[in-house]
Amino acid sequence: MNWQQLVENRHKFFWILQIAGWIGYALVNYIGSKVFEMRDIYIFVIILNAYAGCLMTIPLRYLYRKIWNAKPLILVGVVFGASYLVGTLWSVVQKFNLWEIYRHGYRPSEWFYYFQQGLDAVYIVLCWSGLYFGVKYYQLLQSEKQKALKANTMAHEAQLKMLRYQLNPHFLFNTLNAISTLVLVEENKNANTMVSRLSDFLRYTLNTDPIKKVPLEQEIHALMLYLEIEKVRFEDRLTVLVDISPDANKALVPSLILQPLIENSIKYAIATLEQGGTITIKAQVFANELLLEVTDNGPGADLHEGDLIKLSGVGLANTKDRLKTLYDNNYSFVLSKNEPTGLKINIRVPYERAKKDV
């Protein structure tokens, strides 16, 4: 059991602190008895006093739990009253132990001896009460902190799922339109092939946890499933070049992070060129960072400071939002002009290697 689990287990934490605290009280008194050269029999008085203090403060725990939600004035009044009562009773036990065991029935003649020892006991019980409330508030603070972290994590995961699943209807809309067009022109064989490959791709998306990252080679495999769908539509007009380094292949990336970028290139570059075009996908690892690059040779786009002037659709915006959610500010997503024509998309994220090869 680690420290956090111990703090959260309030019952066990109380008893550990209670016993340890009173053992500490006994040790301090024992050291003091050695300094003042008390006789060895005084150790029995110390043990009895600590034991009595431990037992008599236990009911305070249950009393304080009962009045925990009371008004501040009532709470303070009860704490001081209860501490005074328990402290006074404890001082009586201390006097009895001291006079009967150590001094063999001795009674002091001056009244202030009674009063002084009684106040000392009250101060110690007040300290016990203060520590009890301090620990209690600390436990509540840790509990609220854990709840806040859990709520933040759940919100974070929900946002990621929303962004990932937002791609599915967007992609489905475009693909089903293409299938519908093939059916209308009576290219039933191609339409059937497209439906079959769409089924394989959707099976992959449904079996992949939108929260977890996947190795890049698995992402490329899913991308190839998607590109097979598009090649049914574009045939020889679509050329895809892939250049992935071995280290980059094992890098962890958000699932389906490249698909909307390729879809964007196909929609705004390949589809606009009569002779078709080429999409190039590159990935490498440099300085413990994964560098991804997607380029096309289409007509390009109007850019300003690494972003589109007019951002239409959800693909690029969705990808940028997912990167922001996953990596905070530790990423880059930059659009630039490809030479001689087209659009280039560069992504930089921290390099995380997959634990197991796929």
Image (cartoon, rainbow, N blue to C red):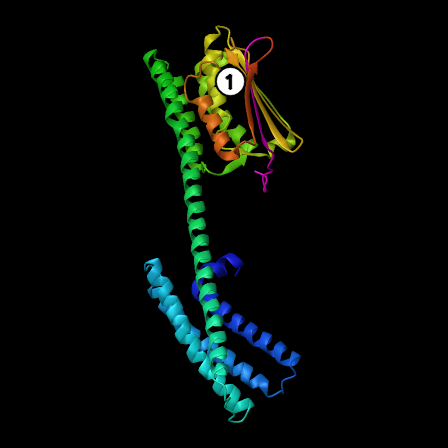
- Three-letter code for the amino acid on which mark 1 is drawn: Asp
Give the magenta-colored segment's residue range. Answer: 341-358
Residue 178 versus residue 109 in the image, above or below: above
Residue 194 versus residue 119 in the image, above or below: above
- In the rendered view, does 82 fall on the left or right side of 226? left
The residue that appears at 67% across and 31% down in the rendered structure is 287
The residue that appears at 51% across and 17% down in the rendered structure is 307
Residue 289 versus residue 229 in the image, above or below: below
- The foreground one among 188 and 4 is 4
Q: Residue furthest bottom?
A: 104
- The foreground one among 223 and 336 is 336
Give the mark count.
1
- Residue 243 screen position, x and y as percent: 62, 23
- Residue 91 screen position, x and y as percent: 46, 80
85 inside magenta stretch: no
Q: Residues within 10 Å of mark 1 (few under 14, many from 20)?
A: some
- Residue 122 screen position, x and y as percent: 46, 73
346 inside magenta stretch: yes
- Write down the residue under mark 1: 307
Q: Helix or strand or loop: what does disc 1 sit on?
A: strand
The residue that appears at 64% across and 81% down in the rendered structure is 36
Indicate the quadrant containing the C terminus: top left, top right, bottom left or bottom right.
top right
Residue 187 versus residue 3 in the image, above or below: above
- The foreground one among 266 and 120 is 120
Asked which quadrant contains residue 330, the reply is top right
Q: Residue furthest right?
A: 287
- In the rendered view, does 65 fall on the left or right side of 321? left
- Residue 348 screen position, x and y as percent: 58, 27
